[in-house]
Image (cartoon, rainbow, N blue to C red):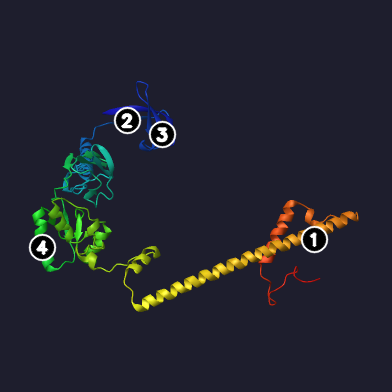
């Protein structure tokens, strides 16, 4: 197709071309012949290049196929959840490895009874989890929700019922160091109660049975807070027909002795009180030496009583003598006071300051009469020095 156009305004980059029907077309100046000026007429041939169009279309389709193969051929898989083990108060859940395809992981959440229980840490490495603290003989429902950049995927709900106290099938035991006969007996007892023994400490291990607290499995059980018990715990569960607490069967717990051990074991008796010992000693027969010793004690007690009575009588005599001395001093003071009154001397005796003071002085005089005289070697205060 040939088109004739008139050159209008010419610029360095763009030239304005006029069509016969007076339309303006902006055309790159570099595509026009050289020495073009305003008013020049140029002929432009326009044709469709089908070959080039087909090549471009093929290239675009190949790019789309490459993008789809890289990012849209597969999508994240829906998690598949199942119950691995259940006990009276716990449930162990597991699922297949998560496949994200080309999507990015946002979160993997566990739901219990329709409510979110929490996010699974490290979902690409962890494929199981343990839920503890559940009620006995109760049904629960669990499901997983996987959130990715390609969408959200939910697993089917799994219904799990915790065991009754008499159901021992959920017990999973890992054994530690045990003598060969005891290990065989333990295996038979575990089989009788319907439990199971597994190799190695796993997430579904409920009890670690051993007689010695050492070894790598024991350390792993302690690290995972798995109860470490003695083989007697399995025997006790078998005898009672129900799961028992592990407090009395811990490896480091005190073992109960035989029934007659309490009488054989030495005990420290509390010393009897004197009130209970004296009648018992009197009732018992005494040897001649003990009789003589008791007589001597009675004689000493009587002498002590006589000395105490003599001391009391001496104290009474001293008190009477002190009262007589007080009376004499009081009379002398009265006489002196009468003499002073007759002489009309305006002097106030210290003893008439107040009745309380006179009584205090009398009390101090009594104490001074009763107190013993200081020895020459005793230190003297400023009151004892004669000035």
- In this rendering, position of residue 271 left or right of residue 366: left
Q: Which circle, 3 or 1, is nearer the viewer?
A: 1
311 or 165: nearer the viewer? 311
Residue at 51%, 69% in the rendered image: 305
Element type at mark 4? helix
> Mark 4–mark 2 contact, CB under 8 Å?
no
Quarter where residue 321 is shown: bottom right
Location of mark 3 (residue)? 14
User: Would you place residue 54 above or below residue 122 in this image?
Assistant: above
Q: Nearer the viewer, residue 342 or 93?
A: 342
Alpha carbons under labels 1 and 2: distance apart: 167 Å
Assess disc 2: are there few (<14), some (14-19) or many (≥20) residues with their C-alpha within 10 Å of its C-alpha. few
The numbered dot on residue 129 is none
Position of the N terminus, as image quadrant, is top left
Q: For residue 332, which numbered disc appears in the image?
A: 1
- Residue with the mark numbered 4: 185
Distance Cα–Cα, label 3 vs label 1: 151 Å
Callout 3: SS: strand
Q: Where is residue 4 in the image (x, y as percent from the top left)?
A: 32, 27
Q: Which of marks 1 and 2 is nearer the N terminus?
A: 2
Closer to viewer: mark 4 or mark 3: 4
Q: Is residue 231 left or right of residue 312?
A: left
Q: CA–CA distance between discs 4 and 2?
A: 108 Å
Q: Tag 3 or tag 4, which sits nearer the N-term?
A: 3
Q: Give the mark, 3 or 2, whose residue is nearer the N terminus.
A: 3
Is label 1 in contact with label 2 (beta carbons under 8 Å)?
A: no
| Location of mark 2 (residue) | 43
The residue nearer to you, when weighing 26 against 263, is: 263
């Amino acid at each position: 197709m040939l088109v004739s156009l008139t050159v209008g305004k010419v610029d360095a980059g763009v030239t304005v071309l006029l069509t016969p029907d007076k339309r303006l077309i902006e055309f790159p100046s570099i595509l026009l012949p050289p020495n073009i000026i305003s008013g020049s007429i140029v002929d432009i041939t326009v044709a469709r290049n089908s070959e080039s169009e087909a090549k471009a279309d093929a290239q675009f389709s190949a790019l789309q196929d490459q993008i789809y193969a890289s990012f849209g051929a597969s999508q994240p898989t829906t998690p598949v959840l199942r119950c691995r083990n259940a006990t009276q108060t716990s449930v162990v859940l597991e699922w297949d490895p998560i496949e994200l395809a080309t999507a990015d992981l946002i979160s993997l959440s566990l739901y219990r009874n329709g409510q979110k229980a929490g996010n699974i840490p490290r979902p690409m490495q962890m494929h199981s989890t343990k839920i503890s603290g559940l009620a006995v003989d109760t049904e629960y429902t669990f499901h997983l929700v996987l959130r990715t950049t390609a969408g959200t995927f939910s697993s089917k709900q799994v219904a799990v019922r915790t065991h009754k106290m008499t159901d021992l099938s959920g017990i999973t035991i890992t054994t530690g160091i045990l003598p060969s006969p005891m290990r065989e007996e333990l295996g038979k007892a575990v089989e009788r109660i319907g439990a199971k023994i597994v190799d190695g400490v796993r997430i579904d291990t409920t009890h670690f049975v051993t007689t010695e607290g050492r070894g790598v499995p024991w350390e792993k059980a302690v690290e995972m807070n798995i109860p470490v018990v003695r083989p007697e715990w399995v025997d006790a569960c078998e005898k009672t027909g129900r799961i028992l607490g592990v407090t009395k069967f811990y490896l480091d717990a005190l073992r109960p002795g035989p029934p007659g051990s309490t009488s054989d074991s030495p005990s420290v008796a509390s010393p009897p009180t004197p009130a209970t010992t004296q009648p018992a000693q009197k009732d018992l027969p005494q040897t001649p030496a003990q009789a003589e010793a008791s007589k001597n004690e009675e004689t000493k007690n009587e002498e002590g009583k006589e000395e105490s009575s003599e001391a009391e009588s001496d104290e009474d005599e001293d008190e009477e003598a002190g009262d007589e001395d007080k009376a004499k001093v009081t009379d002398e003071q009265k006489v002196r006071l009468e003499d002073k009154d007759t002489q009309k001397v305006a002097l106030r005796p210290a003893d008439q300051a107040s009745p309380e003071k006179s009584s205090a002085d009398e009390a101090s005089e009594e104490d001074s009469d009763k107190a013993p005289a200081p020895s020459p070697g005793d230190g003297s205060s400023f009151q004892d020095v004669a000035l």
